[in-house]
Image (cartoon, rainbow, N blue to C red):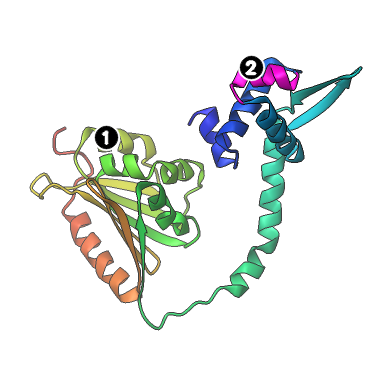
Amino acid sequence: MTPQDTLKQFGLEDKEIRLYIGLLELGEASVLAISRKTGVKRPTAYLILNALEKRGLVSRILKGKKLLFAAQHPKTMLTEAELRMKQLKDVIPQFEAMMHCSDEKPRVKIYEGKDALDRAFDDIFIVKGDQFFMSNMDIVHDVFARTLQKVEYSTLSPEFNVKELVDDSETSRKYAKKVSGPYRKIRFMPKTLPPFATDVGIFGNNVIITSGKKEFFSVRIESKEIADSFRAVFATMWAASSETPASN
C-alpha cells in the first residue's frame, strides 16, 4: 500500500493528501509555495490547509508578517488513530445493545461492485470459532486485498482457527507458503475438479459466496442450517484434498 492509499484510508481526500505530502517535502512554506508545489489553486489550498489544521495534521507559523504552514509529524496520525480506537471501544457495547438481532429466518445481503466486496467479510474478525474457505486465490488477491491486509495483522488462535481449500495455482502455492501455521491449515483441491471460479467463506452462521471475474458481487446468507450444510460440503472436499499441490 502506498502512502497515498494509507492517507485515503485515514479519511483524507485527494487534494488534502497532495497538500499534506507537499508540506512534508517543503517544510515551512507559504500558501503560494504550497499551491505551486501541489498544483492546487491558492484559494482552495488555503481552505484545505485550514481543514488539515483542524484535524491536527498541519500547523500555522507566523514569521513577522508572513503566514507559513508546516506539516505536523506523521506520528500524530498514529496518536489520533489510537484515540479514535479507544473512543470506539468505549461505545461498542452501546452500539451492540442497539442492534436488532433475529434468528427466526435466514437473512441475505448482497454486496455489489469491487470496492464493496471486502465489507462482506468484516465479521470474520469478530465471530469466533472455526472458519472455512474454498478459494480461487487469483480472485481473492484481486478483490479481497484489504481483507488479506487485515488478516496479516490479526492474531489466529484456537478461537479463530482457519482451514482453507485453494485451487492448485502458482498464486495459491505462494500464499500457502506465506501464511500456513498452527491455526491456519491449507490444502489444495484435486486437479480432477472443474476450475473453481468463485470464493466461498463459512464462519458462524454465515456463508459468503463471491463472484469476482466478469461481475463483482458477494451474497452473504445468515442461516445456521445453510452454514451447517456448507460445512458438510467443505468437510467432504477437505478429506479429498492434498496438503501439497498435485503439480509438485
Is residue 35 covered in magenta?
A: yes
Q: Position of residue 34 (x, y in %)?
A: 68, 20
Q: Residue at x 51, y 42 (%)?
A: 153
All told, the count of numbered labels is 2
Residue 204 visible in image: yes
Q: Check disc 2 and give the amino acid type.
A: Arg
Numbered disc 2: secondary structure: helix
Please name the predominant secondary structure of the magenta segment in the image.
Answer: helix
Q: Residue at x 19, y 61 (%)?
A: 236
Q: Which residue is mark 2?
A: 36
Q: Nearer the viewer, residue 46 or 178?
A: 46
Q: Check disc 1 and give the amino acid type.
A: Thr
* Residue 138 drawn above or below residue 217: above
Which quadrant, please, contains the C terminus?
A: top left
Q: Position of residue 89 (x, y in %)?
A: 66, 58
Circles 2, 1 touching at the beta carbon (< 8 Å): no
Residue 74 visible in image: no
Q: Position of residue 128 (x, y in %)?
A: 47, 62
Q: Nearer the viewer, residue 45 or 186?
A: 45
Residue 171's disc is 1
* Residue 127 drawn above or below residue 75: below
